[in-house]
Image (spheres, rainbow, N blue to C red):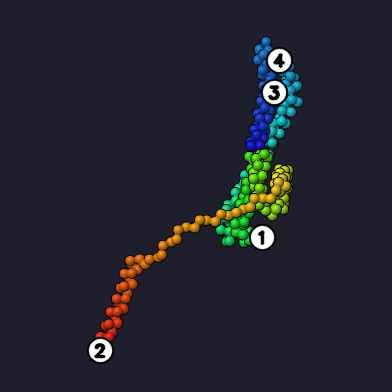
Amino acid sequence: MPVVRRLGAVLGVVAAATGVLAAVLLSPFVLEALSSSKSANWNQLSQIGAAYGFTSAIVSALALTGVAASLTVQNRQARADQVQGIRSYYLELVRLELDDMPVFQPVWGGMDIADPHEQKRHVYADLMMNYAWMGFEIGTIGESLLRDMLAGMFTGEAGRHYWSRSRTSWTASSAGSRRGRRFLAIVDEEHGRAVAAGPPTRSVIASAPAGPASPAARPSPVRLTSTSALIGLGAGLAVGSLLRRRR
């Protein structure tokens, strides 16, 4: 991933600068060890060490630059994690909408699509496009794979209709970065190439096979027993009333 490679390069620079700085600081002791006399002239060694002052300042500046670059990369990574969290929440909202379009679709606003199947295709195409954008933005989906995905998407009328309806909103949300502008350019190129190749394939919903006819409902034995008991009770009450009248 580009972020990981960038972080590795920054850490490599920091490690190299730290090593050079350590070598500069330890150089007087190395010179003493290499000296033929144990009683070293520290005035002479101090003059030699002063000669390394400029180099030491440069190495220190490089080390600070590496630390600053590392903090910048960490800040960008934290920002990417926040964006990923927001998009994951958005995808969860879209999944809820797909589960029950008549209930949740009015919350997002009116849609100029009457057919319920076409509405679901539009929402699913939006999920596909967001997946392609997130992968392209972080580097897991390269340009060749992105073009292959879009070429398959734009062969059908659902994908073409989606981009015709949503291009304006995508331009407003993604054109602010260089990566986003490149993504929009690729999508436009593949959409134009698909349109120039010919008409799209129709989206046909196959009708579900008719299931076996359900058998006629038969009254259960418990229901028949209850009905018979009620009829017998009513008949008994009627007969008892007639006998009382005769008496």
Tell me the residue that label 2 is attached to.
Answer: 246
Of discs 4 and 2, which sits in the foreground? 2
Amino acid carrying mark 3 in the image: Val
Q: Which residue is drawn at 64% across and 50% down?
A: 201
**Label 3 – label 4 distance at C-alpha:** 19 Å
Quickly name the residue at label 3.
24
Upstream in sequence: badge 4 or badge 2: 4
Which residue does the numbered mark 4 point to in the structure image? 41
- Residue 188 visible: no
3D distance between C-alphas at marks 4 and 1: 90 Å
* Quarter of the figure with the N terminus: top right
Tell me the mark number nearer the camera, choosing from 3 and 1.
Answer: 1
Image coords of residue 68 (percent x, y): 69, 36
- Estimate how packed mark 3 is, as few (under 14), some (14 to 19) or many (20 or more) residues with alpha carbons within 10 Å: some
Q: Does dot 3 land on a helix, a strand or a loop?
A: helix
Q: What residue type is labelled 1?
A: Asp
> Callout 4 environment at 10 Å: few (<14), some (14 to 19), or many (20+)?
few
| Residue depicted at 32% across the width and 75% down the height | 230
Label 1 vs 2, first from the N-terminus: 1
Q: Is residue 56 above or below residue 84?
A: above
Q: Is mark 2 on a helix, strand or loop?
A: helix
Question: Which image quadrant for residue 135?
Answer: top right
Residue 35 image offset from top left, x and y in percent: 68, 13
Disc on the earlier residue, 4 or 1: 4
Q: Which residue is drawn at 62% across and 56% down?
A: 118
Instruction: Report the residue marked by disc 1.
Output: 112
- Sooner in the amino-acid sequence: mark 3 or mark 4: 3
* Front position in the image: 43 or 81: 81
User: Which-is-in-front pick, marks 3 and 4?
Assistant: 3
- Please say if the residues under marks 3 and 4 sit with CB atoms less than 8 Å apart: no
The quarter of the picture where the C terminus appears is bottom left
Q: Are marks 4 and 2 in contact (CB under 8 Å)?
A: no
